[in-house]
Image (cartoon, rainbow, N blue to C red):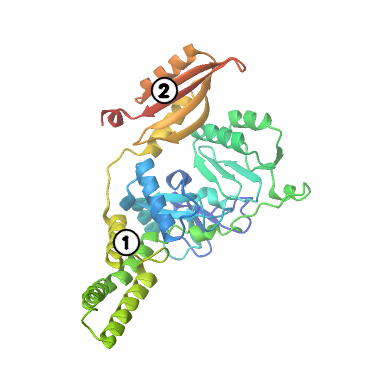
């Protein structure tokens, strides 16, 4: 029999982990899936790129920088706590997993969400919950994750180094190392959402900030397919109209004023259709070329496939190794291909060599790009390139 759990912080929202479902979930329940299988990833996109073009650029960014295959993943722009036009995070899941979740949860439940989106949250407050195996974290409105403790600890440290919250809501006992990290930071701590009100902070609430818009039963690719089906019937009529306009334009010297007026009307119609359907912004210089480019982009989104090593796996394995070493992770970014560029702080050069050796023993390849001694802090600052062995051979 399926068991619903009404956690103390979830209020009247019955929550069911998807792995416990024996049949489709009942009405008004929220089905949760592991947040580690539906991560929030940051994408670097210029503010000037907006609308559907922003989603296409995010798709290409994850394809080129994270090694994700666009035809095998689903991307949802995550705009909670951010500008809805210039969002910088996306919820990413594997298409096969999404189909499995949809079939298992059924259509009657309230929503299917990553587990971290069911935590109560408010601006400037972090919410943490440890279920015994995974740490669920909501770092304000715009960031969240679910991970095992070894992976979660460095993520929390990196987040603290960038921006400390005004308060932390602890919904359970946390791993000892994490408790120590939080104890060393001068941050107010609560154990119940209502305790935020006397401190002059907004009370964290469950599903009060639009989280249900990210119901994983909704397939974003289906929306793109509907757009594509709407556009394709216009291809031939528009191509014929454009060709006709070109023929009439070449005969303007010999035709009458009436024919000139007809030609101008055809050109205007072709440009109007191009503006309404294909080129929504910017100048229309060559309708035929611009239309073909837009169609090629649509085809690429549906059919493109690239076999790259997942940088998400590389990032996870790197953090697991670094957490066992004396190295203090400062930053991590994705370089060309599937390599990670990591900057870390170590006590001495011997520990740097030991850390590189430890990474090698884990099956990864580490290359020291730069290392120097900081005479002020008496530490070694090092920059490493970390990759899978097969990525180096390529």
Number of other residues with Cα within 10 Å of mark 2, as a class: few under 14, some 14 to 19, many 20 or more: few
Q: From the viewer's perspective, is 217 left or right of 295?
A: right
Q: From the viewer's perspective, is 343 left or right of 335?
A: right
Q: From the viewer's perspective, is 245 left or right of 82?
A: left
- Is residue 107 visible in the rendered image? The answer is yes
Mark toward the start of the polypeptide (1 vs 2): 1
Q: Could you tell me which residue is drawn at 39 percent across and 72 percent down?
A: 276
Pick out the residue farthest to the front.
253
33 up-or-down from 154: above or below: below
Image marks 1 and 2: residues in contact by CB distance under 8 Å = no
Element type at marker 2? strand
Q: Could you tell me which residue is drawn at 45 percent across and 19 percent down?
A: 355
Classify the position of the C terminus by image quarter. Answer: top left
Number of other residues with Cα within 10 Å of mark 1, as a class: few under 14, some 14 to 19, many 20 or more: few
x%, y% of residue 155?
53, 35
Q: From the viewer's perspective, is 109 left or right of 391?
A: right
Q: Which mark is residue 355?
A: none
x%, y% of residue 156?
57, 35
Residue indicated by mark 1: 294
- Residue closest to the eye, 6 or 239: 239
373 up-or-down from 137: above or below: above
215 up-or-down from 151: above or below: below
x%, y% of residue 99?
35, 56
Residue indicated by mark 2: 369
- Residue closest to the eye, 33 or 127: 127
């Amino acid at each position: 029999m399926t068991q619903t759990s009404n956690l103390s912080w979830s209020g009247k929202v019955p929550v069911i982990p998807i792995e416990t479902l024996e049949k489709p979930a009942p009405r008004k329940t929220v089905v949760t899936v592991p947040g580690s299988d539906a991560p929030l990833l940051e994408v670097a996109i210029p503010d000037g790129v907006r609308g559907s073009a922003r989603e296409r650029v995010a798709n290409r960014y994850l394809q080129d920088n994270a090694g994700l295959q666009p035809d095998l993943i689903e991307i949802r722009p995550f705009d909670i706590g951010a500008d809805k036009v210039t969002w910088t995070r996306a919820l990413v899941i594997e298409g096969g997993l999404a189909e499995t979740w949809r079939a298992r949860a059924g259509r009657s439940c309230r929503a299917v969400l990553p587990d971290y989106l069911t935590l109560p949250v408010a601006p400037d407050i972090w919410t943490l919950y440890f279920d015994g195996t995974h740490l669920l974290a909501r770092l304000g409105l715009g960031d969240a994750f679910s991970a095992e403790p070894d992976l979660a600890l460095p993520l929390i440290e990196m987040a603290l180094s960038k921006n400390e919250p005004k308060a932390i809501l602890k919904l359970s006992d946390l791993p000892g190392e994490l408790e120590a990290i939080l104890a060393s930071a001068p941050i107010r701590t609560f154990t119940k959402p209502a305790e935020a009100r006397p401190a002059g902070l907004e009370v964290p609430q469950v599903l009060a900030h639009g989280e249900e818009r990210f119901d994983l039963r909704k397939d974003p690719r289906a929306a793109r397919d509907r757009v594509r089906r709407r556009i394709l019937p216009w291809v031939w009529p528009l191509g014929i109209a454009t060709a006709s306009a070109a023929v009439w334009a070449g005969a303007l010297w010999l035709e009458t004023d009436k024919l000139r007026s007809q030609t101008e009307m055809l050109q205007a119609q072709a440009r109007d259709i191009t503006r309404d359907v294909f080129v929504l912004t910017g100048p229309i210089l060559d309708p035929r070329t611009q239309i073909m480019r837009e169609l090629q982009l649509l085809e690429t989104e549906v059919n493109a496939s690239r076999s790259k090593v997942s940088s998400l796996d590389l990032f996870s394995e790197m953090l697991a190794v670094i957490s066992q070493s004396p190295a203090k992770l400062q930053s991590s970014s994705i370089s060309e291909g599937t390599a990670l560029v990591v900057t870390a702080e170590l006590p001495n050069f011997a520990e740097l060599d030991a850390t590189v050796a430890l990474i090698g023993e884990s099956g990864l390849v580490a290359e020291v790009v730069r290392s120097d001694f900081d005479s002020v802090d008496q530490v070694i600052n090092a920059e490493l390139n970390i990759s899978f062995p097969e990525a180096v051979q390529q």
